[in-house]
Image (cartoon, grey):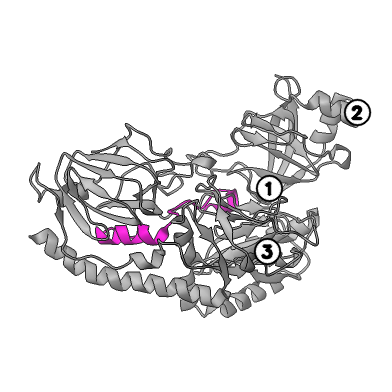
């Protein structure tokens, strides 16, 4: 029903991920930019979070063999259905036979593509998310791969006759600013248990870092002046979580992301606020990373506020979606 | 049972019971994890036991609806204070045997380890198969067990150059630890042997063969 004609590297199918299997060493998985992923699903009326595509930086093209209701969020990229430019952050109906092309993003790193009804790929440990590094789930998307959509997609898409140009909603949600796609804002970092081991415990906040090109779904290694340790204690390995900032022996911090290992032995010098995981997911390797402090309670409140905002948006969108689909 | 409760960022709490690798501490940790699991607190989405600590991963919406972090901490305190110092049998202390082919192509480092430790291969196999190990934590890869109880004579620094590819099922030692690689991966430990058991299979009802708290013995078999 859906064919991958061309695909950017590090692209995969992601839903909420695997929360229940952490004690067995199974990575969380799920979207790196959970905000864009959630909004995309919401725009096509999917329960959050259904399986959607996380598309890496590069050029991608897909063939929709059947009509579909889709939404594109995330990085600022030019997207085309045939020769017609597709807008992002709103639902779009496309006809059978439409080719959707995504050009390399102008700002940001990852684009999210949701389809009404979600992508119907195999469930592994209760989730459709890939963690290719851990050998779990559907492999990273490849050229020629075909994915199933659901009957819901078929039903909703029937409304547009084959060969028609795409029909886009005449409204959109203003959810993009939260991503800081220009990359100017400092990222909010809570203090880590082992920050006392650093020669300068404020170092994570006082220097700029770069983002390594070796970044992937498991981790984002940072570049810059190595942080020196005044007390190199031998640490017993303990659980870690996406957002944990570790300090390996070479002094260059590594930020753990969705596909990271569950247990780590390196010092934990900080934890990224959960709301800012979406922001770091959109940073490009040439961007400058700097951190500012935030307390745990403040970070939790930001997350809850953002979730409440999504719920309010969903109410407004739901009414508008009915209008589109009844036309 | 003394412990410290710290935030692990905004979405998890870490209960630290100690800072060393020790069998009785590990048993306490497993008992604590087991007790907290039975609480079935709606804000706790997963419980990850480790050598000397337990991480609780949180649902922030449920946390807020149920009295916040303070309420969760007091429930945990009440739960752990009831455990006391005598531990009954743990739910998860089943004994699992790992049939292992030592040496040859299955254990390419056995002879090098024997030379390094100045100890005959047969003695190394005996020392490795004698203890009943305990699974302290599972991580690094899905299903990868960190086993406590390696005989001190077998403690050995990792290989100076890690292998690019360690075959799945490899039984290895490194530092003061022994473990089994569930899937092929790069690895820096010394490979003593190999098992055909699948340590992790996502299609099984119980995907991981070894879970925290399990007891493990290696059994030498012939190829």
Q: Which residues are magenta?
A: A21-48
In the image, is residue B95 part of the stretch drawn in magenta? no
The quadrant in which the C terminus of chain B is found is top right
- Answer left or right for A33 relative to A114: right
Quick check: can you spot residue A47? no
- Give the secondary structure at mark 1: loop
In the image, is residue A38 part of the stretch drawn in magenta? yes
Q: Position of residue B19 (x, y in %)?
A: 78, 61
Q: For mark 3, name the chain.
A: B
Residue at image mark 2: B119
| Residue drawn at x 50%, y 53% as measured from the top left | A258
Q: Name the N-terminal-most of marks 2 and 3.
A: 3
Q: Quadrant of residue A123?
A: top left
Q: Residues within 10 Å of mark 2 (few under 14, many from 20)?
A: some
Residue at image mark 1: B214
- Give the secondary structure at mark 3: helix
Disc 3 to disc 1, C-alpha distance:
15 Å
Q: For mark 1, name the chain.
A: B
């Amino acid at each position: 029903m859906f064919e991958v004609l061309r695909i950017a590297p590090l692209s995969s199918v992601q839903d909420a991920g695997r929360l229940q299997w952490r004690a067995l060493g199974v990575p969380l998985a799920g979207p790196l930019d959970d905000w864009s992923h959630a909004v995309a699903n919401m725009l096509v009326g999917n329960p959050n979070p259904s399986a959607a595509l996380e598309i890496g930086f590069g050029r991608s093209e897909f063939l929709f063999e059947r009509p579909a209701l889709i939404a594109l969020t995330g990085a600022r990229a030019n997207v085309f259905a045939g020769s017609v430019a597709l807008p992002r952050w709103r639902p779009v109906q496309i006809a059978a036979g439409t080719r959707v092309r995504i050009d390399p993003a102008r700002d940001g790193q990852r684009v999210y593509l949701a389809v009404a009804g979600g992508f119907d790929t195999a469930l592994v440990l209760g989730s459709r998310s890939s963690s290719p590094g851990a050998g779990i789930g559907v492999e990273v998307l490849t050229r020629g791969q075909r994915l199933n959509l659901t009957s819901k997609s078929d039903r909703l898409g029937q409304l547009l006759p084959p060969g028609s140009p795409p029909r886009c909603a005449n409204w959109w949600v203003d959810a993009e600013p939260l991503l800081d796609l220009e990359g100017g804002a400092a990222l909010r970092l809570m203090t880590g248990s082992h920050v006392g081991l650093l020669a300068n415990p404020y170092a994570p906040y006082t220097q700029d870092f770069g983002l390594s090109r070796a970044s992937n779904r498991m981790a984002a290694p940072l570049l810059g002046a190595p942080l020196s340790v005044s007390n190199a204690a031998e640490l017993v390995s303990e659980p870690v979580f996406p957002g944990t900032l570790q300090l390996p022996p070479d002094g260059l911090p590594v930020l753990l992301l969705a596909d990271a290992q569950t247990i780590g032995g390196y010092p934990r010098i900080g934890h990224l606020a959960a709301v800012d995981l979406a922001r770091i997911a959109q940073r490009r390797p040439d961007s400058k990373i700097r951190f500012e402090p935030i307390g745990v309670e403040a970070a939790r409140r930001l997350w809850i506020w953002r979730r409440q905002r999504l719920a309010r948006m969903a109410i407004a969108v739901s009414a508008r979606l009915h209008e589109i689909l009844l036309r | 049972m003394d412990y410290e409760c710290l935030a692990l960022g905004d979405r998890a709490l870490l209960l630290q019971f100690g800072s060393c690798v020790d069998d009785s501490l590990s048993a306490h940790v497993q008992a604590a994890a087991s007790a907290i699991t039975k609480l079935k607190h709606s804000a706790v989405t997963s419980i990850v036991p480790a050598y000397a600590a337990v991480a609780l991963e949180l649902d922030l919406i449920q946390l807020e609806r149920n009295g916040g972090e303070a309420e969760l901490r007091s429930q945990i305190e009440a739960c752990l204070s009831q455990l006391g110092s005598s531990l009954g049998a743990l739910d998860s202390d089943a004994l699992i045997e790992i049939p292992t082919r030592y040496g040859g192509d299955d254990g390419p480092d056995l002879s090098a380890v024997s030379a390094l430790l100045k100890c005959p291969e047969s003695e190394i196999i005996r020392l490795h198969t004698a203890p009943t190990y305990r699974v302290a934590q599972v991580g690094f890869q899905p299903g990868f067990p960190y086993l406590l109880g390696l005989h001190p004579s077998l403690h050995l620094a990792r290989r100076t150059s890690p292998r690019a590819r360690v075959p799945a099922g490899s039984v290895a030692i490194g530092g003061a630890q022994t473990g089994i690689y569930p899937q092929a991966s790069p690895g820096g430990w010394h490979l003593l042997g190999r098992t055909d058991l699948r340590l992790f299979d996502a299609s099984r009802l119980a995907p991981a063969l070894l879970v925290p708290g399990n007891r493990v013995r290696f059994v030498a078999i012939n190829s």
